[in-house]
């Protein structure tokens, strides 16, 4: 996860986002909540998870810029026990149609790209440039947290949605 510049990061985000969201183009609205015992998430949950994490990154940056957030929102989170957070994503997007979810996903990706474009290279790539990018006493770069909350999720869930689709033909 080393990016040489903003353009490389943005292109990687866009490519992985497009590859992931394309998997939803042939899904039926009625199958979005179908559970497959082999896969941890249903299609709705996978999409809400990705949207929710992007939403958090954007909210953290917005709050820090407004002076609302002085420390990491995640300081006290137990990273191995985030079921409550995922449930908040599912609850927030529960009444969205498949098209609305796809639109929300695409809008969040564009907002992440806008965020990247508005940051200096120093802010984006150097550790410790945002309070929200600190957790458990460690400083991270905004780039690293954006990668983890976009590209890593898109790749992970692309394989899961493909497996879900294969199992539910």
Image: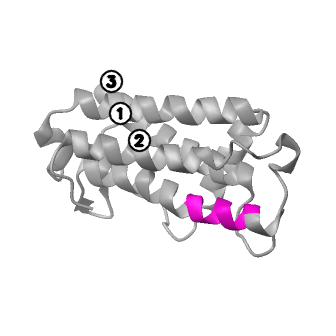
Q: Position of residue 15 (x, y in %)?
A: 42, 46
Q: Is residue 131 left or right of residue 125?
A: right
Mark 2, Cα crowd under 10 Å, few <14 / some 14-19 / many 20+, is: some
First reached walking from the N terminus: tag 3 or tag 1? 3
Task: Classify mark 1: helix, strand or loop.
Answer: helix
Mark 1, Cα crowd under 10 Å, few <14 / some 14-19 / many 20+, is: some
Identify the magenta region. Answer: 157-165
Task: Classify mark 3: helix, strand or loop.
Answer: loop
* Mark 2–mark 1 CB contact (< 8 Å): yes
Which image quadrant is residue 13 in?
top left
Q: Position of residue 25 (x, y in %)?
A: 69, 42
| Residue plotted at (53% across, 63% down) | 156
Disc 1 marks which residue? 113
Q: Position of residue 36 (x, y in %)?
A: 81, 68
Task: Identify whether 27 is placed above or below 42.
Answer: above
Disc 3 marks which residue? 66
Q: In front of the other: label 2 or label 1?
A: 2
Q: Main secondary structure of the magenta part?
A: helix
Which image quadrant is residue 94 in?
top right
| Residue plotted at (75% across, 66% down) | 166
Disc 2 marks which residue? 14
Task: Classify mark 2: helix, strand or loop.
Answer: helix
Task: Identify whether 135 is placed above or below 142.
Answer: below
Quadrant housing the C terminus: bottom right
Mark 3, Cα crowd under 10 Å, few <14 / some 14-19 / many 20+, is: few
């Amino acid at each position: 996860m080393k990016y040489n510049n903003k353009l490389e990061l943005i292109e990687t985000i866009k490519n992985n986002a497009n590859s992931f969201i394309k998997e939803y183009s042939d899904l039926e609205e009625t199958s979005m909540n179908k559970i497959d015992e082999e896969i941890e998430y249903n299609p709705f949950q996978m999409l809400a998870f990705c949207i929710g994490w992007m939403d958090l990154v954007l909210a953290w940056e917005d709050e820090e810029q407004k002076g609302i957030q002085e420390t990491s929102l995640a300081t006290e989170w137990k990273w191995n026990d985030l079921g409550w957070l995922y449930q908040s994503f599912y609850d927030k997007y529960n009444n969205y149609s498949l098209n609305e979810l796809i639109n929300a996903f695409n809008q969040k990706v564009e907002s992440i790209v806008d965020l990247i474009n508005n940051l200096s290279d120093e802010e984006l790539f150097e550790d410790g440039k945002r309070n929200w990018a600190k957790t458990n006493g460690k400083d991270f770069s905004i780039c690293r947290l954006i990668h983890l909350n976009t590209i890593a999720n898109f790749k992970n869930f692309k394989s899961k949605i493909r497996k879900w689709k294969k199992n539910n033909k």
